[in-house]
Image: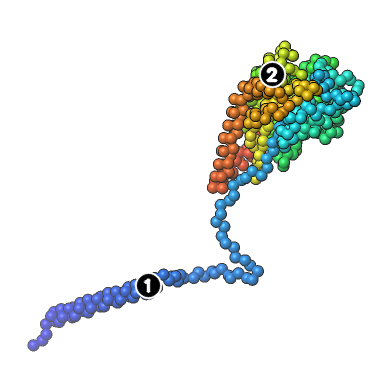
Amino acid sequence: MAQNPKRGNIAVIVVLTVLIVLMIAATAFLIYLSIDLVNKEADVTPTGSAMQLPQTTQTKPAPTETEETEAPTTEAPETEQVIATATIGAMGDLLMHEPVFRTCRQSDGSYDFSSIFRYIKDAVSGLDYAIANLETTFGGDNYPYQGNPAFNCPDPLIDAVKDAGFDMLLTANNHAGDTMNDGIKRTIEIVRDAGLATLGSQLSGENRYAVVDVNGIKIGMVCYTWAYADYGSSFSLNGLTPVKDEGQMNYFANNNPDKLYNELGPILEGMKADGAEATMILLHWGQEYQLTENAAQQKMAQKLCDMGFDVIVGGHPHVVQPMAVLESTENPGHKTYCIYSLGNAVSNQRNGYVSACPGAHGEDGVLFTVTFEKYSDGKVYVAGVDALPTWVNMQSNTGVKEYNIVPLDKENEAEWGNLGMSADQVKLAGNSYERTMKIIGEGLKTCQEDLAQAKADREQYYLDLPNHPEWLEAETAEETIAETAVETEETTLPDAA
């Protein structure tokens, strides 16, 4: 009997199906073994041993005998540090009335002025740079030696001034022309021959300013005085005979302050070109015997702040006037520190001697100091100000009449009796101290607190700067914009009249 073909086909299909299932199972088993083998090989590395990483195709060559390996730098950049300081001191008027210099005349007819500075010498000589206002002239024998109204003092005064430690004298004030043009010139020569600098008057062709290097910090300084009258080709500083204007004196008239501002613009540029890193202006201004500054002084001070001066030191009123911090209306962030009047350093303006002078304020003065700091990035800042009250003691305790400038350091008040004063004079000195601090105390505190905060902010900025390089980039960009603005202004503004 023949086989059924359909049944045969079914058998074949069953066999093939079994074979396929067996092949799939075998394949799955082989895959399992492979995975298990890989896992076992990965577990071969003992605990604590370094894993062997595949090497890259590029390897760093071993150092040669002359090549040294360098450890990577991990330290943060150093912050900026103070690398130099300079303390400048300024005293008020050396107002050489005839009774003052007469007490310095010796039995042989010579003069010795050292007694005036006997007690202030240590304070002055301890400064990095010291300035005073010379309120007289060295006109020589061609003019009488006298005080008001036309001052002329014997030359030996300069020897005592130098010995006391002063470095510069201001030679622009309302009595600087009392011995006319030849007296202006001779005064400059006498002061310079003694080794001191002059500021405010100059010889023909010289700059109207000075840039003084003090401990590696360059300070631009300029001095101006008010004039009683400005006639264009001549001027009168105190209402006496007009002096021919030969460019020797820096002056302005109260009714024409633009003369001052127009001249100061190029002066500031000249200072900058000569390397000045900070600026001071010393002014003979204001109204005599007034214990507070007037509106004209305030307006001028603000203008000078806006122009960019860092420090303003005033004189002329013969009494002490307040201190203040000014904020620029032109340059946000810029401040100027101002004392409106230093008072008298020495004079014969005693209590009751001058009807216009209230009480004994003519006996009072201030040794004003300003300290600049230079950082390692080259920037210079006003870091501090201070004021040491002084008193003029007219005394004959040893049988010889003297005028002494007495420093009134409150911390050493117990030692005041050792400064040539009797018990009664020590009390008068205490009264002088109280008068002066009543005028400048509040402003001095404001200036000092403002500068202390500015220094703290500056130190924090420098501390944070290494982590914020973008601050320096932004600052550089702002400076570039400011310089461009100044250059554009200079090219568009008309020339000063």
Q: Is residue 170 visible?
A: no
Where's residue 180, x and y in %? 86, 21
Front residue (pair 22, 244)? 244
Q: Quadrant of residue 218?
A: top right
Q: Quadrant of the C terminus?
A: top right
Residue 358 % position (x, y): 68, 14
Q: Is residue 349 among what the camera can see? A: yes
What residue sits right under mark 2 in the picture?
A: 361
Quadrant containing the N terminus in the rendered view: bottom left
Quadrant position of residue 195: top right
Q: Label 2 sits on what residue type?
A: His
State the image coordinates of residue 335 (x, y, percent, origin top left).
62, 31
Vertical order, 351 against 204 (above or below): above
* Residue type beneath disc 1: Ala
Tell me how the rendering is colored: rainbow
* Crowding at mark 2 (Cα within 10 Å: few <14, some 14-19, many 20+): many
* Label 1 environment density (alpha carbons within 10 Å; few <14, some 14–19, many ≥20): few
Q: Secondary structure at mark 1?
A: helix
Q: Residue at x 63, y 31 (%)?
A: 411
Q: Is residue 135 above or below residue 69?
A: above
Residue under the point 67% across and 35% down? 371
Nearest to N terminus: mark 1 or mark 2 = 1
Query: Where residue 42 is drawn, which disc sits there?
Result: 1
Outermost top residue: 355
Please state which of residues 311 and 90 is positioned toward the viewer in this rendering.
90
Q: Residue 468 at x, y = what percent?
A: 54, 46
